[in-house]
Image (cartoon, rainbow, N blue to C red):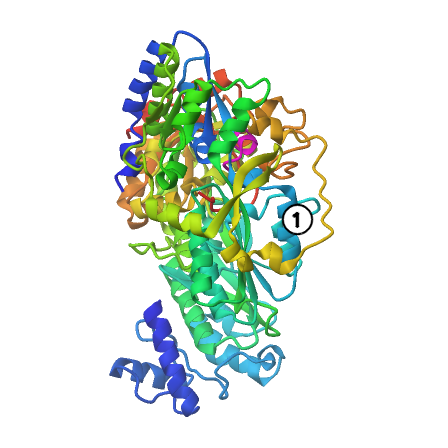
Amino acid sequence: MKYLTEFRNGEIAQRMAREIHSITTRPWKIMEVCGGQTHSIIRNGIDQMLPAGIEMIHGPGCPVCVTPLELIDKALAIAAQPGVIFCSFGDMLRVPGTDADLFQVKGAGGDVRVVYSPLDAVELAQKNPDRQVVFFGVGFETTAPANAMSVHLAKRRGLKNFSLLVSHVLVPPAIEAILQSPGNKVQAFLLAGHVCSVMGYWEYPPLAEKYSIPLVVTGFEPLDLLDGIRRAVIQLESGRHVVENAYSRVVTFEGNRAAQKLLAEVFEVTDRAWRGIGVIPKSGWRLSEAYREFDAEERFHIAGIHTQESALCRAGDVLRGAIKPAECAAFGKECTPRHPLGATMVSSEGACAAYYNYGRFISADELATAGSGLSGAAHV
Amino acid sequence: MSELREKMERDLSESSEKPTSGAKAPMDSASVDARAEALAYRAAPDFSNWSCPLPLAGYPTIVMGHGGGGKLGNELVEYLFLPAFRNPALENLGDAAVLDLGSGRIAMSTDSFVVQPLFFPGGSIGELAVNGTVNDLAVSGAVPRFLSASFILEEGFPLAQLAAIVEAMAKAAATAGVQIVTGDTKVVERGHGDGCYISTAGVGVLREGIQVGPHRAQPGDAVLVSGTIGDHGMAIMSVRESLEFESQIRSDCAALNGLIAEVLDLAGSAVHAMRDPTRGGLASTLNEIAHSSGVGIAIDEASLPVRTEVQSACELLGLDPVYVANEGKAVFIVAPEAADSVLKVLRAHPLGRDAARIGQVTGEHKSMLVARTAMGSNRVVPTQIGEQLPRIC
């Protein structure tokens, strides 16, 4: 419980922000990898507390945003089949496929259910032996252990009616792809704390070395983020480039070995398409040979998918950090959370939606001075 | 409520063995009396021991015939609705209730209730239906007087549950001091409804000299909320999504007309706007007021009253309590000089103990709600597009 308040102390946050101001002598561009971090930065106004020269670039770490369109379309096709119970995390429901989203499939009679854990979907399969239960297993290394556990359990229980539609993506190859992309502007990364809680950070020192780039394992609360940024700036200012752990209350170097063992058993590394970015070699997981029978793509053989992305949407450029959401011509015009053209406008973790929701209508100056008379109101 | 439901189910299982011996072996002598009395169809309901006279004509569940306009439907009215809601206007059972509202302007409101599950910690669809309409009238500056109630029942819906809902409505109406004076029942085929939907309408008499409306907020006004936010929405979510939280979150469902009357008695025309932040939560309500009045509203997140367990549950699901529904809370936009005294009155009332002053109306950032975060920075709090979706991670 104390985590709800301890790492949200406004006074300490202001002090840390002042420290960042005092150590910053040049402009720096820092990417937070994870969508949860983007959400927290915008939600808490962390970006407003930083020196003008420090620019936070929002990374590709929103699982909703990078799940390829083809897989969304497959999900829609499977969910629409009679006899299927299609289970998903809540925010996948509004992600636009080529023609529709899961909400529309549900409205048309598909049995689409929001669950909070893939294990709930396994229970559903057990309780509904005459139905095919499919779980939409998306996400980074963070959500992978629970997804792995679901097929592991299904296999152990001999369930023939459970399968996983998998689109797992991995952080280190994505970071490397960004660093290799022409015109890359990112000078330091805040590594995704929850990914590292599973995987540890032993994969990262070679990256820091090879690309001479500071990498800081960072949490999600305001003070975590400020500390991650502070450490990145200190490294940048002093010309160092190592992996640091600013989230040691959760993350160890080795990570969760038991989870990693299960992941290695259930999944194998594969090339993966990232929505808006393209195929990144060896950047994802699919079910291994031993678990292939639980792969929904194998079970349902969906053919004839013709995907078509919006011609206006520049989600890929946003995800690579090449442009800010507001620099896209469609932002706030053709593309809004009500009518999203790309997935980054859908999830609350998506960079475009976060910008639209929390900052779009107001200039930075006006926002900064808003509610200046509030201090009195708070202490009645 | 769960006690009541258990009792209903117990009674039902006893009754279904012997359809005409509903009075057999209840738990205590008081309810024996109550049942006997009710079964004799002559009692005005005494809700301390009141119990519904079930089953009707041997059916333990709703059948299509209950909506057929024949004997079964009449029995439902005569043995269930009338004893529960009894009042002179209803008793005529005419096509319309004839009401004496005195002179003055009246306020009218309507609402529909489709909540699932029907029974939840802290209330049921019955209390919601009454309190929701009472509150809509009260925040409009009216004294709620009369309600209508229409039931859309699904074939197969247990009569015991309907009785429990009706009893909850009767109690809520008695507590709020309103009468349910007319109603209707329809039955839909199994699979075409969700057990029980309720639609209500309400009328009230506007208080003299009170001018409130969402368009009346003025720069400088104080923003007050009558208590903790997010309780109802998270209570529903905790049972609907089978999430097991360590501590049970209860709905805040309550009639606010008493509390609002005290505020208006004290502050009168210094109250510029009142709303009950139901669906869409506090953020949607304040956005609506900002939009209607052409003003900006700034709130201080640190001053928002949120129960620890509600905050924790929201964190777990990636939800923001400012968007979560309330069913027993009101927002007051009052002239700054009246803010302290209104807050005092609110806090002295049992339904307003956790009331807080949370922000102010401003001439800047028009039509927008801005929150000062605990970090000391600001963020725009927009209206949500649809329902909040729990995040992946």
| Residue B29 x %, y % | 25, 83
Residue ID at (47%, 48%):
B278
Which SS does the magenta portion mostly show? helix
Nearest the camera: A107 or B369? A107
Q: On screen, B203 above or below B223? A: below
- View extreme (front): residue: A289
Quarter of the image containing the C terminus of chain A?
top left
Residue ID at (46%, 52%):
A266
- View extreme (top): residue: A25
Q: On screen, B282 above or below A230? A: below
**Helix, strand or loop for disc 1:** helix
Query: How many marks do you count on the picture?
Result: 1
| Residue B380 x %, y % | 48, 29
| Residue A153 x %, y % | 42, 61
Nearest the camera: B131 or B249? B249
Nearest the camera: A12 or B264? A12
Is A121 magenta? The answer is no
Question: Which quadrant of the view contains residue B154?
Answer: bottom right
Question: Which quadrant of the view contains residue B374?
Answer: top left
Residue B73 appears in the picture as rendered: yes
Residue B295 appears in the picture as rendered: no
- Residue stretch in magenta: A348-355
Quarter of the image containing the N terminus of chain A?
top left
| Residue A61 x %, y % | 49, 34
Amino acid at the residue labelled 1: Asp
The residue to which callout 1 is attached is: A73
Chain designation of label 1: A
Dot 1, crowdedness within 10 Å: few (<14), some or many (≥20)? many
Nearest the camera: A220 or B336? A220
Q: On screen, A237 above or below B279? A: above
